[in-house]
Image (spheres, rainbow, N blue to C red):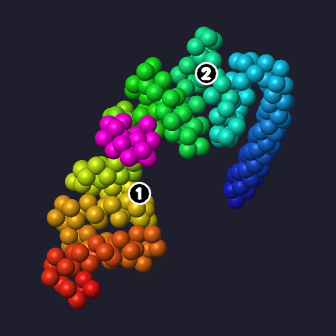
Amino acid sequence: MIGVLIAIITGAGLICILMAVSGIQKKSANVQGKGRSKNNVAVIRDCTKKISKDPHNVEALKTLADIYYTDLNYERAFPLYQTLFKLMGVHVEIDQQVVSQRYGVCAFKLGKFDEAMAGFSKVLRLNPKDYEVNLYVGKIMLEKKDFEKSILCLKRAASIRPDSSEIYEPLGFALFEAKKYRESLMHLKKVLDENPENKQALFYFANAMEECSMSDKALKIFMHLRPDTKFGPESCVEAGRIHEKMGQYDKAV
C-alpha cells in the first residue's frame, strides 16, 4: 500500500514538472515570436529608409521582399522582387533563381500572369525540373486556354513529384478542356476522392463519362447537380439530352 502511494506521489510530481517545463517552453516561444515581430518592424523601418535614399539598394530590397514574402504579403513583396528582377543583369550578387521564382509567385497570386511568366521562364531556363514553377506555368496556361502547353507543364511537374495532389485538379481540367476525356477521368476521380464537394470537377467528370459512352453513370451525376446554382442549369440540359438519346422523352422534357 505504501509502495503504491509512493508511486502515485512520484507520478504526480513528474506530471507537475512536465507541465511546468511545457509552460516555460510555451512562454519562451511566445516571447521569441514577439521578439521576432518587433525585430521585423525595426528591419522593415530600416530597409524602407535605405530604399527611400537608394531605390536600387539590393540588400535592403532583398531583406524587405523576403520578409513580406514569408508573411504571404504578395502585394508588398511584388514590386520589390520586380525591382530585383530588373537589376539581376547588373548585380551578380542577386540569386537569379530565387528572385525570379518569388517574383513569378507574387505576380501569379496577384493575377498578373504575363509578369509571372517572365519570372517563371527565367527559372525554367536555369532549372527546367523545378516542380513548383512547372505547376504554376501549367496553371497559367490553363487560365490562358493554351491547354496543350498546360498539360505538358503539369505532366512534367507530375514526373518530378508523382505523389503531389496539387496537380490532379489543373491537369484533370486541362485534359478535359483539350477533349482528352478518357485520360481526364483518372485525374478528376482523384480530385473527387479528396474533395467530393468539388462541383466543377464533378461536372467535368460527368461530361467526360458521357463522352466515353458511360451515359448511365453520367446521368446520375447530372441529376445530382441539378439543384446547384452554378452547374445546375447545364446539368439539366445534359440530363435532358441523355434522356432524349434513351428515348425517354417525357423525362427529357
Q: Disc 2 marks which amino acid?
A: Lys
Apparent side of residue 95 relative to residue 170 in the rendered image (left or right):
right
- Which quadrant, please, contains the C terminus? bottom left
Q: Is residue 235 above or below residue 169?
A: below
- Residue at 56% x, 40% y: name it: 112
**Residue 194's disc number:** 1
Q: In the image, is residue 149 part of the stretch drawn in magenta?
A: yes
Q: Residues within 10 Å of mark 1 (few under 14, many from 20)?
A: few
Label 2 element class: helix
Image point 63% across, 18% down: which residue? 87
Measured from the top left, where is residue 239 in percent x and y?
A: 28, 76
Counting residues from the start of the chain, the first of labels 2 and 1 encountered is 2
Of marks 2 and 1, the one in the foreground: 2
Question: Quick one: 39 or 126, which is closer to the camera?
Answer: 126
Please give left or right for residue 246 compared with residue 99 in the image.
left
Image x and y of residue 179, in percent:
25, 52
Q: Is residue 80 magenta?
A: no
What residue is pinned by disc 2? Answer: 86
Q: Give the label on residue 177, or none.
A: none
Q: Nearer the viewer, residue 84 or 2?
A: 84
Gap between marks 2 and 1, in whole Å?
41 Å
Q: Are marks 2 and 1 in contact (CB under 8 Å)?
A: no
Query: Looking at the picture, which amino acid does disc 1 mark?
Result: Glu
Quarter occupied by residue 157: top left
